[in-house]
Image: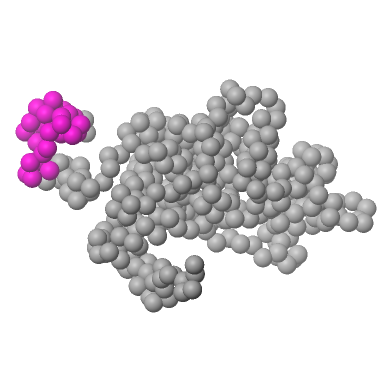
Amino acid sequence: MNQTDLAKLLGISRPILVAIENGQRAPTATMLTTIATALDVRIRDLATLPAADEPSLVRFRDPLRTDESARAGVDALIDFGRYYRMFESKTGSRFRSRAVPPLSLDELNGPHAAADLAASERARLNLGDGPLLDLHAVLEQDVGILIFGLTELRETKIAGLFTYSLDLPLVGFNVVQNDARRQRWTLAHEYAHFLTNRYDAEITYEEPKARDTKELFAERFATHFLMPSSGVSRRFKELIGVSESATVAHVVLLAGQFQVSFRAMCERLEELERIPKHTYAHVVERGFKPLEAERSLGIERKDESLPRYPQRYLRLMRLIWNKGAASEGDVATYLRTDRLSAREILGAFETGKQLSVDRPLEGVV
């Protein structure tokens, strides 16, 4: 619906509607009700939520022209950002992140640019060169990215979304991907976009038909960020020990340590010339099944999905709920879920054990 269409529904001219949108003219109660009905939103949200970041929506619009499910995912992600900004304004809380200014890909030219950026980010965040097992916590708590699981993407081939809306870095992942390793890869990929083309909304597909320069860079960054050369090489040598040569079991064990797929580790070791070229293609042709190999080696896969909501998001929502400033229906809206699920989450907030974490520590000076 464009402005002309909405103005006709309201019985006003388009210039008056523009003045209302720009905050130069206040709508009447009747007009506010009509706007809410026409746009299928709540009057309360029209009056309290910050405006959506239109540039973010525009950047997403072209690639999602015919995909309604994907558009719903984009809307959900940006709405989460709007709710979070509202939480901050109501609680007077503002998170201080350790994010850095974005770099353009023009500044990162050269064959080793992705590897260099991955190494510098690991150093800046004091991550060393070992397995990065809790990437989700690092990106949320240290960098300040808000990460949401999007049920709206269930019927799509989209692995993840990234946008910088309302001065917030937002990442959404497809909840259908209940493989924690794939989700970690998606997060590392989106982190590359945050570090480089931050102001360009981005869509990552599970099996893209074509990759542009930005996508290729993000994939290379994810490879080096999750599997740094020095850390992978050192642990590979430790695994092999006194063995005469590497085996498939060594690769499976190493993939488990770094929490990446068998294929990703194979390709990384091939690149580092630790195993023969085309090893992955060769073992797959022979019917090798990584999951069966993991079970036979006693590797316990952590396939639980990532949390659907950021801890910061839930904490601020909880503060609003405890103050009586949000109803159960509001919470269901903020979580984009049904009232029963919202009630279960609120139930955890209401227990004495949960509430005790906010009490001052006795004897602390």
* The quadrant where residue 229 appears: top right
Residue farthest to the front, as pictured: 365
Relative horizontal placement of residue 328, taking residue 292 as reference (left or right)? left
Query: Which SS type dominates the magenta stretch?
Result: helix
Residue at the spot x=48%, y=34% of the render? 198
Colouring style: one colour
* The quadrant where residue 71 appears: top left
- Does residue 174 appear anywhere in the picture? no
Between residue 197 and residue 26, name the one nearer to us: 26
- Does residue 318 appear anywhere in the picture? yes
Relative horizontal placement of residue 143, taking residue 233 as reference (left or right)? left
Relative horizontal placement of residue 98, taking residue 60 as reference (left or right)? right
Q: Is residue 96 magenta?
A: no
Is 352 drawn above or below residue 284 in the view shown? below
Give how far across and how far down residue 79 sits, in percent. Answer: 33, 46
Give how far across and how far down residue 344 sits, in percent. Answer: 36, 69
Give how far across and how far down residue 121 sits, in percent. Answer: 62, 41
Residue at the spot x=68%, y=34% of the render? 116
Q: Quadrant of the N terminus?
A: top left
Residue at the spot x=70%, y=27% of the render? 111
Relative horizontal placement of residue 239, taking residue 206 as reference (left or right)? right
* The quadrant where residue 348 appears: bottom left
Between residue 273 and residue 287, name the one nearer to us: 273
Residue farthest to the bottom, as pictured: 352
Residue at the spot x=43%, y=38% of the render? 163
Q: Which residues are magenta?
A: 3-32
Give how far across and how far down residue 157 sits, in percent. Answer: 48, 44
- Count of marks overlaid on the render: 0
Between residue 136 and residue 24, name the one nearer to us: 24
Q: Is residue 11 magenta?
A: yes
Is 175 drawn above or below residue 11 in the view shown? below
